[in-house]
Image (cartoon, rainbow, N blue to C red):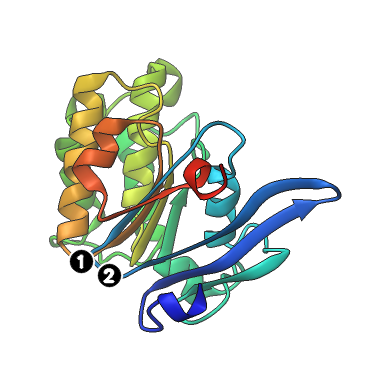
Amino acid sequence: MASDLHSSSLVIVDEAAVTRGADALLRPCSASVDPGGALVITGGNGSGKTTLLTLLCGLSTPTAGTVLIDGRAPDERSPAFRSAVAGMLGLPPLARDLTVEEQLRLVTVSWGAPAAGPSGPHAVAHRLLDRLQIAHLADRFPHELSSGQLQLTGLALTLARPSHLLVLDEPEQRLDTERRGVVAGLLRELRDEGRALVVATHSPQIVDALATEVLDLDAAHP
């Protein structure tokens, strides 16, 4: 509830709910996330995990309650909001005629990366490919990738954006246990570097590795 939430938190969800007619897509829930914290959202299919993430990404608005990012309602049309929040709700668009590395470079340039140096397109692309253990895919095109490789590429493209908050919907999709561990380790590193994360997942491996707080949407409304 409002009195239990920290007004200084980067993310505040206060009794947020979404209804469509007689259907409750998300029943009232509350949570907060500070920089360097990771809120992991669990619950069965239909519990509202993805709906909550769409609120955080500014793709929809609550029909009750409030959602605030850095003290303001999410607004995907705001350049400041888009530069602060990077979300992956499904695979991002991929250009068929660009290689994995070229797509990563394009994203970093689009978000104002310098031409060279540790924050430049080449360095960012190679760092992400190395950390996700997909450097061998750098010269491949999207249609040459498996479903798991596409998932890791989509995650790399999301992480290539500047952000204070990462919003991820089931980043473990299509990945085996080993690859889930790689993703969990990288996200934990980003959390420890001060990034805030909100992650919806079905994976206990992700929960155990990452969560500083868990919001179980099933337990909230038995």
Question: Which secondary structure, mark 2?
Answer: loop
Looking at the rendered structure, the kind of residue marked 1 is Gly
Residue under pointer 1 = 194
Looking at the rendered structure, the kind of residue marked 2 is Pro
Q: How far apart are marks 1 and 2 (CA)?
A: 5 Å
Observer-nearest of 65 and 120? 65
Observer-nearest of 18 and 163? 18
Could you tell me if residue 134 is visible in this image?
Answer: no
Please provide percent x and percent y for residue 70. 43, 78
On screen, residue 78 above or below 96: below
Please provide percent x and percent y for residue 36. 23, 65
Q: In this view, does 207 lie to the left or right of 141?
A: left
Please provide percent x and percent y for residue 37. 26, 62
On screen, residue 211 above or below 142: below
Q: Which residue is drawn at 51% across and 72% down?
A: 1
Q: Which residue is drawn at 42% across and 36% down?
A: 170
Residue 55 picture quarter = bottom right
Q: In this view, does 2 lie to the left or right of 151?
A: right
Give the residue at the far front of this rendering: 222
Residue under pointer 2 = 35
Please provide percent x and percent y for residue 211. 26, 49
- Which of the two labelled residues, at mark 1 and mark 2, occupies the earlier sequence position? 2
Could you tell me if residue 77 is visible in this image?
Answer: yes
Question: Which secondary structure, mark 1?
Answer: loop
Q: In this view, does 221 lie to the left or right of 212?
A: right
